[in-house]
C-alpha cells in the first residue's frame, strides 16, 4: 500500500526501473531521532502513527506521489495510509490508539480531509504542510520496531525514491 506524503534521509544512484534515489527531502520533527510508539500494546489494537514532517532542501520543487513504510515486523498489518495537512488538523498529530476510549483533547483524523491519492508539491526550501499517517493493526507478538519511511516523488520530470529515518515501537511487555 502506498499513500501520498514525503520523508527521507538521502541516497545516491539509481533504484532501478528508471527511478533515481532521491536526496531532496529531509525529515523533521519528532520521530526523526529515537523512536515514537506505544506501550501496553495488545493483539487486536489498532494505531495511527505519523511520518515525520518533510522539508524540500533542494532548489527545485518536488511533487510527492506516494509514501509507505519500509520495514514492517511480523505481528503488524498495515491497514492503510492517509495524508493530512497541518492547515486542516489542529497541528501535527503524532499518533493515537484507535481501540482505546478517547480522552479529552483527542482528535479523530477521519473528520479531516485526506489527501492520499493526490500528488502535492513542496516548494524549494519549504517545510510541507502535509504529513502521512499509517494505520496499523497488531495481529501477533511484535518483537521489532517499525522503521523506514519511504517517499516517491518527481522533480524536474524525473521520478525519485527516498527513505527517511523514522522508527515506531509497539511495546508488548
Image (spheres, helix red, strand yellow):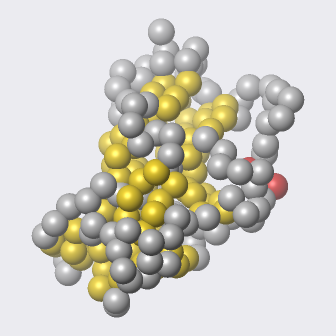
Q: Residue at x 45, y 63 (%)?
A: 55
User: Total marks drawn?
Assistant: 0
Residue 161 in sight: no
Is residue 132 found left or right of 144 in the rendered image? right
Q: Which residue is the extreme one toward the left?
A: 13
Q: Nearer the viewer, residue 136 or 61?
A: 61
Is 138 drawn above or below residue 136 in the view shown? above
Q: Residue at x 47, y 60 (%)?
A: 54
Q: Which residue is the extreme one toward the bottom?
A: 157
Residue 74: x percent and y percent? 36, 31
**Residue 40's quadrant in the figure?**
top right
Q: Which residue is the extreme one toward the right?
A: 104
Residue 105: x percent and y percent? 83, 35
Q: Nearer the viewer, residue 58 or 16?
A: 58
Is residue 126 found left or right of 98 in the rendered image? left
Q: Nearer the viewer, residue 88 or 44?
A: 88
Q: Residue at x 71, y 51 (%)?
A: 91
Residue 132 in sight: yes
Residue 143: x percent and y percent? 36, 21
Q: Residue at x 75, y 55 (%)?
A: 89
Residue 79: x percent and y percent? 56, 47
Amino acid at each position: 500500500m502506498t499513500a501520498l506524503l514525503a520523508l527521507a534521509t538521502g541516497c545516491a544512484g539509481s533504484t532501478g526501473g528508471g527511478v533515481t534515489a532521491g536526496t531532496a527531502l529531509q525529515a523533521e520533527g519528532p520521530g526523526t531521532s529515537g523512536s515514537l510508539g506505544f506501550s501496553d500494546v495488545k493483539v487486536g489494537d489498532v494505531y495511527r502513527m505519523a511520518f515525520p514532517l518533510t522539508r524540500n532542501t533542494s532548489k527545485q520543487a518536488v511533487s510527492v506521489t506516494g509514501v509507505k513504510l519500509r520495514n514492517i515486523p511480523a505481528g503488524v498489518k498495515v491497514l492503510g495510509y492517509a495524508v493530512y495537512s497541518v492547515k486542516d488538523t489542529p497541528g501535527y498529530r503524532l499518533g493515537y490508539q484507535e481501540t482505546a476510549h478517547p480522552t479529552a483533547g483527542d482528535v479523530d483524523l477521519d473528520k479531516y480531509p485526506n489527501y492520499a491519492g493526490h500528488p502535492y508539491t513542496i516548494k524549494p526550501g519549504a517545510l510541507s504542510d502535509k504529513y502521512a499517517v499509517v494505520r496499523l493493526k497488531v495481529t501477533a507478538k511484535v518483537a521489532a520496531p517499525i522503521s523506514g519511511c519511504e517517499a516517491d516523488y518527481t522533480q524536474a520530470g524525473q521520478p525519485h525514491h527516498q527513505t527517511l529515518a523514522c522508527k515506531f515501537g509497539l511495546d508488548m511487555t
